[in-house]
Every structure is written in C-alpha cells, then in structure tokens.
Amino acid sequence: MIEVEQLTKTYGKLKAVDHISLCAKPYEITVLLGPNGAGKSTTIKSITNLLKYEGTIRICGHANDSIEAKRSFGYIPETPMLYDLLTVKEHIDFISHAYNCKDNQQITEEYLNLFELKEKLKTPAKELSKGMKQKLSMLLALIIEPKALLVDEPMVGLDPYSIEATLHLLEKLKKQGVAILISTHIIDVINEIWDEAYIMNKGQIIKHVFKSECETETLKNLFFEVTGE
Amino acid sequence: MGVLTRLWYLKQKAMLRNLFRKPASAILTIFMILIYGVITISLLINPAQVYVMKDLHMAVLCSIGFSALLTFSLLLSKRKALFYETDSFILFSGPFTRKQVMRYLFSQTIIQSLMFSFITVFIFITLAAGFTFTFPFLMTCLFGYFMLYMFFLSLTDYVYVLSITNQKYKMFSKLIVASLVVITLCICIVHLANQDFQFQNGMWTLVESPLFYYVPVFGWMKMLLFGVVDGNTMQAFISGILMLTAVLIVYFLMTSFQGDFYEQALLDAQEITAMMKNVKSGKNNGTRINTRMHKANVKFQTGAGAIYSKNILIMKKTRDFISITDIISIGIYFSVSYFMDLGYPMYCYMLIFWLFQVMNTSDLVTELKNYQIYLIPAKPFAKLWYAILPTLYKVLILVSVSMLVGGVLFHVEAMDIFQYWLMLIGYVSIFISATVLSIRILKSRTNAVMEQMMRMLLIILCSLPGILLTVYMLINQVYDETLLFVAGNLSLILNLVLSACILCACKNMLNGRELNDD
C-alpha cells in the first residue's frame, strides 16, 4: 500500500504539489492523471523519496525513507537510468545482489521471456534500443518482487505488442496483490485496467474517482470534463 | 553569407544571455572574470618577488608545450564533429553552398581559438611571474597563440572532412603529430650531440637555442615572441608572416574543398551532441559512448556492497584505471621538477594538482547522480562509502606508485617518501570528501561548468589548512626529519578529520531526498 497524506512540494514560490492525499491499495491499479505540469512526476518522485517535501508518505506501512520501504517498492521511471557499459545480465546481477534477492532466477527468467530480453543478456545497455532499455528498466523494478510498484509514464517508447504485454503484466501483478500506482497522461492505454484514479491539475487533486462508480462514462471524458480542456 | 553571419551573431548573443540568465550564474561569471582579471593584472603590474620559472625561455616553452598538448589531443581525438546537431541540420539541409558552410565553420574556429589563446596567455603570464612585460609583447603573445590555434583547429577540421571522403587520409592527423615530434626530437639530439650529451646542462641550453625555431608553427611562435623581446623586428615579422600564411593556406584548402562529407558529419554531430548532453546532465561519462569494452567478471557483494562490485566491474571492462592523460600529466610534472631541479617536494606538490584533475573526471560524480543507488535498501552511509571506495583505491594506488617511482629517481630517503606520502593521503581524502560535499550542496540544479568551478573552490577551501602547512615547508625549505614528520602528520590528521566530518555531514545524501531536492 502507498499512502500519501497532505503532500506539499514547493520550488521557490511555486507550489508544484499542494496538500494532496492519495492511497494506492493492494490488488488495485491506481492511476494518477493530469495534464503536463499538473504535478504527477513531482508526486511520484516524492513517493520514491527523491525529493524533499512536506507531508507523510508511507509504503507498506513504513516511512518512505526507511530501508524496509525501499525493499518493498519497485520504481519504473519515465526515462530509464541504466549503466551504459553493463550488460543486461550484469544489471540483473547488480540489482539482485543490491536488493539481496538472489533466489529470483525463476521470476527473472519469466520476465526475460516476457520482455524478449533473453537473447540480449550479453548486450551492453548502451546498445539496446529505446524500447528495450525501457523493458530492462521494467524488468529491474520487477525482479525484486515488489509489494508496491510506482510507474511513471510506462508506455513511452514501447511498441504496440509490448504495450499490450505490459498491460497484461500489470493486471497479473494486481491479482498477486501488488499495489500499483501509475502516473500517465496517455489515458487511452490504461482505460481498460484502472481501478481508481486521481486527476491532478495545477498541483491539486481535483477529482478522485473509482471505476465502479463510472457507469458509461470513460475516464477520458471525465478527465476533459474536470480539467476543462 | 548574411544569414549565417546573423546566425553566428545570434548564437553568441544567446550564449552571453544564458550566462547572465540566472543570478547565480551571473554572479559566478562576474566572480570568475574578476578573479582571473585580478590575478592577471596583479601579475603584470606587480611582478612576484619569486620567479616561478628561472628563465623566460622556459616559461615560453612551457606555454608552447601546453598548446602542443591541447592541439595534438584535438588532432588525435577519435571523436570529431564540425558542428553540434542543430547547426548541422540547418547548415547541411539549408540553402547554403559548401563554401558558406566552411566559412561559417571558420568563424566558429575564431571564437574557439580566441578562448584557447587567452587561456594559454594566462598560463604563460603565471609561469613567467617575476618578469615584466610590455603591452606590445602581450598583444604579440595573444596574436601568436591565436594564429597557432587557428592553424591547428582549422587543420583538424580539414583533415576530418578529408578523411570522411577517403579513409586513407585518416592517418594524416597522426602523421602531422608524428612529424612535429620527430623534428623536435631530431633538434634535441643534434643539440645534445653538440653538448657531448651532457644531459642536464644540454637541456638548459636547448631551451635557449634558436634551433627550436625550425619546428613548424610552434618554433615560429617562440621566434615571434623572442623577436619582440630582443627587439629584432625582422625576426618577429618573418615569424608572424609565416604563421599567418599557414592559417591562410588552411583557410584556402577548406573553403575550396569540394568533397561530399555531409552525411557522416551529421552522424558525428549527433553523437557528439548526445555525448555533451550526457556530460552536462551528469547521467554518465559522456566520453564513453564508443568506449571499447573488455570481458570481465566480478562476484557481486550483497546490499550496498553491490555498488562497489558494479563499479569494479565497469572499471575492469573499460580498463579505465589509468588514462594516457594521467600518465602524460604525471610525466610532465616529473620532467619539469627533475630537469628544472625543483626537487621532490615540488613534484609532490604538483601531484596535488593532478589530484584536482582526477577528481574532476572521476566516475564518483556520475555514480552519485544515478537514482538507482538511492533506491537500494541499505544504510545511506554504507552506500556512500561503497560508492567512494573504487575512486579511493584508484587514486591511492596511482599516488603511491607515482611517489615511489619519483622518490627513487630523485634519490630521496625512504622515510622522506613516506612522510610526503602521508601528506598526500590526507589530500586524497579531503579531495574525495570535498567532491561529495560539492554534490551535496549543489545537488542537481546547476550546469556542469558551474559544478566543476564550485567543486574546485570547495576542494581548495577544504584543503587550505593542509596546503598552508605544505607551502610553509616548501618556502622555508624544511627538510628536517622531525619537522617533516610533525608537519606531515599534522596535515594528514587535519585533512583526515576534516574529511571524516564532511562525510558524516553528508551521510544521509544517498537516502535520495537530500540530493535531488531543488
């Protein structure tokens, strides 16, 4: 579970995020929507403890700066940050040892197959295409078997087949009890899989909606209605 | 050409505007101009009481040596491009003739040459501290270096476009450098033979010998300067004309070049632009885009230790333990202190400058900017320690070997080597911790240039107590074993304590929010 209470983040005089509260529960896919500059990425980075903020953030019951919290969540950033000279296998070894999850061969194997990275095990990251880098970034976040998953614009750079596979994977993880929080502005892609959505604009949450509450209205229509765009 | 002149003008204006866009950047720019301005003027109007170089010839040769290093490294660089990506797209796809493009390139070279010549003249003035100079001499110096850089930078571009059209011309760069080195060596040998191979004395007389004037361009530079110093107008005029002619020949060759180089030049421009972006953002070491990798293995440690294993693996793969630049730098420092009889203490002092250089190119900065290590579930201080460890090992080993080899060649007692070694260990620790501190203070807000300058400033501030002790020892020619022991240990203890304090103050940095917050 990811719990955010009264999160505020300011850059000088600008309030990028203004007293927002949200919760991503296990067995659910929670979506953070909003136009450019709404404060989505700031929220995600605050949750991952990469920014200083005011408010309280807990991951699986632990403060987000604790070792326990770090062990519990996986983070897939919008731009993959990989080590150019390390191969796919070396990246996997590094993360497995850093997170002390060396007995994850089976799950690693599964993700290697899913992301079609098995043939690229010896390829250095710098030689991977943009999409393959994104897949490797996802794989690294998933092999630690996170209880909570933070995803920032997950489909950027992926081909249609991979987008489909990723959506299936997110649903599978959801069924396994992972709390998933996705930040995106590409609404069409997540329309089928979301359970709960927070719509942000100008640093504030302007709408909190459950899929079960929307009968015929699509998330896209709702988004345009509340953001007035 | 009107359009391209306007583009050039707009770009220069934008560059200046960008420097003054933010208050911090504007203050820093003015601060740097003032610092360098004050240093230059004070050196000129108030000559130092102590001569840095005993001989003006040596100061001139050292500054020429610096320009040779710079131009040779550009000529031999494997990664070249004429422009950055945006310029390439506009120039290669726009309605411009090849001649216009080449002239535009030449106009870029003018700015670059001016910058390089200012830097070289500054170095020369610093090296020649103690001598008084006239304004015409300084202007001649600036003109000479400007011509020297114009020639070599344009030649580098010309060889580059030639090699695109035909691979066999690629060796021209090596050939040019090799020819100049061979000519210089031949002159050295001829001169030393005339001096019955009395090495140390021979080197001194060689420095003053007019034989050096026969080395193309570099020799002409010395000829020009000493033409002015000696009041030999004809000598100065001939050398000036020779340099100008050399530049005009390359200009003519470039503007009349008809080969098709656009496609490869565009690809190279994209690569260089990507590399520069990486360097500026600190995402990774930009120069590694085309690094050759070797097979290597490592047994990963668990937790924070995995960071150390990963860095050792990268080091093994790139065999990036000591670079050619490191070897050249240490070699130069040794040669200067040995042949100029400056002694082992000065050699050690020079190694401190080399440490500055190493810390600027260290992977530590890159490592501390990758978000991966903040997310690793381990104690922040442990992560910081393991991130520092590879750099610490590398620098310690290189410093120790350089000092030991230097000590043996200088015939220094083992105990003295050990004392100086202790002193430098203190500096190693302070330099590493100051690098961490600068990242902690600067976070991710600034550009790479500002970061480097701030880091330099912090390193100087942190190592000031140690430096003052060292300078005191050098000035007072302290060779007394007891004093050396006390000073060495005091400096070491002072620096180690300061380093420990800094690292403790930064211990939470790798928790994440301490670093990336704006």
Image (cartoon, rainbow, N blue to C red):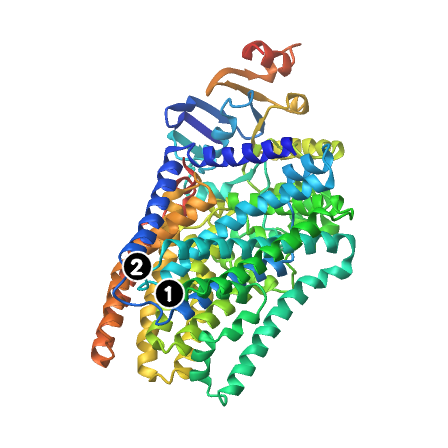
Marks 2 and 1, the one that precedes in the sequence:
1
**Are there few (<14), some (14-19), or many (20+) residues within 10 Å of tag 1?**
some
| Number of numbered markers | 2
- Residue at image coords 39%, 43%: B442
Farthest residue, direction bottom: B196
Marks 2/1 in contact by CB < 8 Å: the verdict is yes
Q: Quadrant of the C terminus of chain A?
A: top right
Residue situated in front as seen by the camera: A82 or B436: B436
Residue situated in front as seen by the camera: A2 or B341: B341
Separation of marks 2 and 1 at Cα, in angstroms: 10 Å
Return the x and y of residue A85 as percentages of the image width and height: 62, 55
Residue situated in front as seen by the camera: B509 or B414: B414
Q: Is residue B1 above or below residue B335?
A: above
Hey, what amino acid is under mark 2? Ser
- Residue at image coords 65%, 50%: B251
Hey, what amino acid is under mark 1? Ile
Return the x and y of residue A111 as percentages of the image width and height: 68, 44
> Image check: A34 left or right of B461?
right
Return the x and y of residue B164 as percentages of the image width and height: 75, 52
Q: Provide the residue designation for mark 2.
A: B463
Question: Label 2's element?
Answer: helix
Return the x and y of residue A177 as percentages of the image width and height: 58, 33
Q: Provide the residue designation for mark 1.
A: B352
Q: Is residue B359 above or below residue A186?
A: below
> Image check: B314 left or right of A159?
left
Question: Label 1's element?
Answer: helix
